[in-house]
């Protein structure tokens, strides 16, 4: 009963480096999301996907890319890391378009860009 | 775009007392869902309570209850008999369509 799994849990990047944050869910959820949470702030939506092969931008997409080749996986790619991308990143999923079920969140990835 | 506002950045309450966290939102939708999430120091996002906009009855989950005022677009969380384990960040969130929009959060400290 894994739910939403994010890897890695922590990472330090140098300015200009690239990396991929992994997100996998085993609940057969159609909708998946990437959020970032800056210190002391709420979560802001980066990208989301409503199914395999379909992705769309959220509120803060600049500097990121995503892909959704399978229902289970929704990786987030950071190209040319910048200090402004220092944040905690959360992946989330939900089965249906709307509903009272709430979202299932991963445990987060803390990224520091130095 | 929908916005969610939590006007209390920090609050504190004595153990066993009651505290209310405020949340307002802006939307033109008639059907939507509202949530309160708890984020303890472990960073995990934990769903505390949910409310469907079409339901007039306020949701209740054990010590947690909400005061949902649809016309005023207000959705406050009441925590009764506060416990030390309630210390956390609390986020109000709004869901309509594909996206979940969060407020800025309220840091709650429960004091012994």
Image (cartoon, coloured by chain):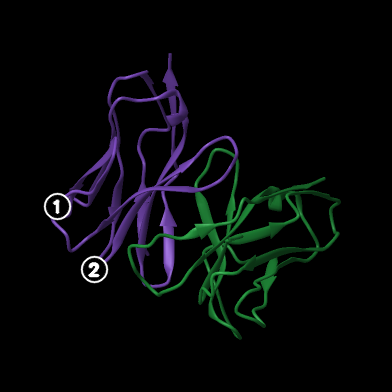
Residue A83 shown left or right of residue A74 in the figure: right
Kindly identify the residue that appears in the image at 17 percent across and 54 percent down.
B70
Q: Position of residue A41 (x, y in %)?
A: 52, 43
Q: Is residue B103 above or below residue B9?
A: below
Q: Position of residue A52 (x, y in %)?
A: 59, 83
Q: Nearer the viewer, mark 2 or mark 1?
A: 1
> Front-most of B57 and A48?
B57
> Front-most of A44 and A9?
A9
Q: Chain of mark 1?
A: B
Kindly identify the residue that appears in the image at 72 percent across and 64 percent down.
A22
Task: List the single residue furthest toward the front.
Answer: A1
Kindly identify the residue that appears in the image at 23 percent across and 49 percent down.
B59
Q: On the same chain: label 2 and label 1?
A: yes
Q: Which residue is mark 2?
A: B31
The tint chain A carries is: green
Q: Which mark is residue B57?
A: 1
For the N terminus of chain A, the image quarter is bottom right
Task: List the single residue furthest toward the bottom.
Answer: A53
Q: Which mark is residue A46?
A: none
Identify the secondary structure beneath mark 1.
loop
So how many labels did they put on this image? Answer: 2
Q: Which chain is purple?
A: B
């Amino acid at each position: 009963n894994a739910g939403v799994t994010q890897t890695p849990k922590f990472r330090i990047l140098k300015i200009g480096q690239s990396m991929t944050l992994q997100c996998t869910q085993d609940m057969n959820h159609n909708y998946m999301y990437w959020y970032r949470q800056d210190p002391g702030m709420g979560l802001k939506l980066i990208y989301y996907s409503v199914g395999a092969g379909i992705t769309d931008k959220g509120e803060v997409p600049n500097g990121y890319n995503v892909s959704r080749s399978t229902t289970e996986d929704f990786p987030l790619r950071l190209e040319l890391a910048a200090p402004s991308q220092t944040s905690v990143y959360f992946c989330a999923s939900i089965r249906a378009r709307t509903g009272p079920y709430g979202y299932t969140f991963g445990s987060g990835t803390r990224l520091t860009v130095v | 775009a929908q916005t969610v506002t939590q006007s209390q950045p920090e609050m504190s309450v004595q153990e066993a007392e009651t505290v209310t966290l405020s949340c307002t939102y802006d939307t033109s939708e008639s059907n939507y869902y509202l949530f309160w999430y708890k984020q303890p120091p472990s960073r995990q996002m934990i769903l505390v309570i949910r409310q469907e906009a079409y339901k007039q009855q306020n949701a209740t989950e054990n010590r947690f209850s909400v005061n949902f005022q649809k016309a005023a677009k207000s959705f406050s969380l009441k925590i009764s008999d506060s416990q030390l384990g309630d210390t956390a960040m609390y986020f109000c969130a709004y869901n309509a369509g594909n996206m979940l929009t969060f407020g800025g959060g309220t840091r709650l400290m429960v004091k012994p």
